Each structure stands twice: as structure tokens, then as C-alpha cells.
Amino acid sequence: MIFYSDPTSHYSHRVRIVLAEKGVSADIVDVDPSHPPQALSEANPYNSLPTLVDRELTLYETRVMMEYLDERFPHPPLLPVYPVARAESRLFMHRIEQDWCSLIESIQNSRSDNVVKRSTKELRESILAIAPIFAEKPFFMNEEFTLVDCCIAPILWRLPTLGIDIRASKQSKPLFTYMDALFRRESFQQSLTEQEREMRL
């Protein structure tokens, strides 16, 4: 199994967390997005990152990769057993893409200072708004670590580089407790690239 990974992208990071959580020995190839190797171009018609190659199968959408790995390597399970809970987890991941990832794209890629400021403010407020739910369960709406947490963890890790400063307060305390548990998790530490470690030095 080969995983072509952008060492700074939160999309690549989420899949690396799943690989580490499952203990899958994949060949992780760090790729500069501006200089993709020919092997990636041959495997993926979009020449995009990340890309997972498992024998004859090539995947280039992160949620598909994550669910494939969860089914291919069922222990530990990273999606709930029951259909309703599984559907809710998928919906949470979809909302993260729509609500948070789109704002991150604006922060990282927009040339307009106003757009960046507005997106930074909106993302900070959105994260703070959900902070209290972490007081109810140890992980996101769940007693167990799931694929939803795999999507959230790389975003929270990148908050300093996104210019988002969340101060300690009564409202944010459950969020900080959650972040601390995520970041200390062995699979998370194993998933970090050198560039990602430098994001929180």
C-alpha cells in the first residue's frame, strides 16, 4: 500500500491518523504538490493529493479512503456499528467539510485580506460554539475515537498557523481537554510529519 501525502495538508493528515490508528504499514510518500511524481500522475487522473494506492485500487477522495481503511482493517473500528450512528458520523464529516474546510481554503488561498479576516473570525466562532459539547463525551459526540475525530484533529492542530487564537475560558475548557486528549494519542503523534510538528513549536 502506497499513500501519496502532502506533509502539510490537513486532508492528508486525517488519512495518516487512520493508518496509524489501524497500525497499517503503508509506504507514505511525502509529495510537493507543485512537483508531483510521475507515479502519482499515472495512478490518479486528477494528479491530486492525497492518493491511496492498494494494489489495483486507487483512491483520491479522503472520506472514501478513510472508510475503505476502516472496512479493510476492521480493528479498531472507527465508525459506529449501528446504521443511524454511522449515518450521523458521515453527516458530521460532511458538515466539517462544508463548514470548516471551506473556511480553511479561504484563509490559506484568498488574496483578499477582508476575506481572510472574515473567514478566520467565522472559523474561530464556529469552533468555540461547539466547545461545550466536549463536556458530555470524551470524543466528538461519541464515547469512542472515530473517523470524525480524525477529521477534526488536524484542523485543531493547525489553529495557530491559521491565525486563530482561542483563549482559555469556561466555555473553551472542554475543547482544550478534548484537544489535549487527541494530541497525546499515540496514533496522532505517529501521524505527524516534521512540518506539522513545527506548527506547534
Image (cartoon, rainbow, N blue to C red):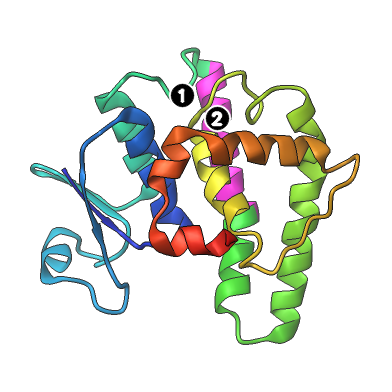
Query: Which span is picked out in magenta?
Result: 84-99
At a point 55% along the width and 20% down the height, the residue shown is 144
Instruction: Provide the major secondary structure of the magenta segment.
Output: helix
Q: Which badge, 1 or 2, is on the more N-terminal residue?
A: 1
Q: Which residue is mark 2?
A: 89
How packed is label 1: few (under 14 Cα within 10 Å), some, or many (20 or more)?
many
Q: Which quadrant of the view contains residue 106? A: bottom right
How packed is label 2: few (under 14 Cα within 10 Å), some, or many (20 or more)?
many
Q: Position of residue 56 (x, y in %)?
A: 8, 43
71 vs 83, left or right, is left
22 vs 83, left or right, is left
At label 2, the amino acid type is Ser
Count the marks.
2
- 95 in relation to 9, above or below: above
Assign the N terminus to one quadrant of the image. Answer: top left
Q: Is residue 45 visible?
A: yes
Mark 1 to mark 2 CA distance (whole Å): 7 Å
Q: Which disc number belongs to residue 79?
A: 1
Assign the C terminus to one quadrant of the image. Answer: bottom right
Q: Which quadrant of the view contains residue 31? A: bottom left
Q: Position of residue 85 (x, y in %)?
A: 56, 19
* Residue that extends furthest to the top in the rendered view of this protein: 82
Q: Position of residue 183 (x, y in %)?
A: 56, 41
Q: Is residue 15 visible?
A: no
- 166 in relation to 132, above or below: below
Marks 1/2 in contact by CB < 8 Å: the verdict is yes
165 vs 159, left or right, is right
Asked if residue 98 is among those painted magenta in the image, a careful observer would answer yes
At a point 64% along the width and 31% down the height, the residue shown is 140
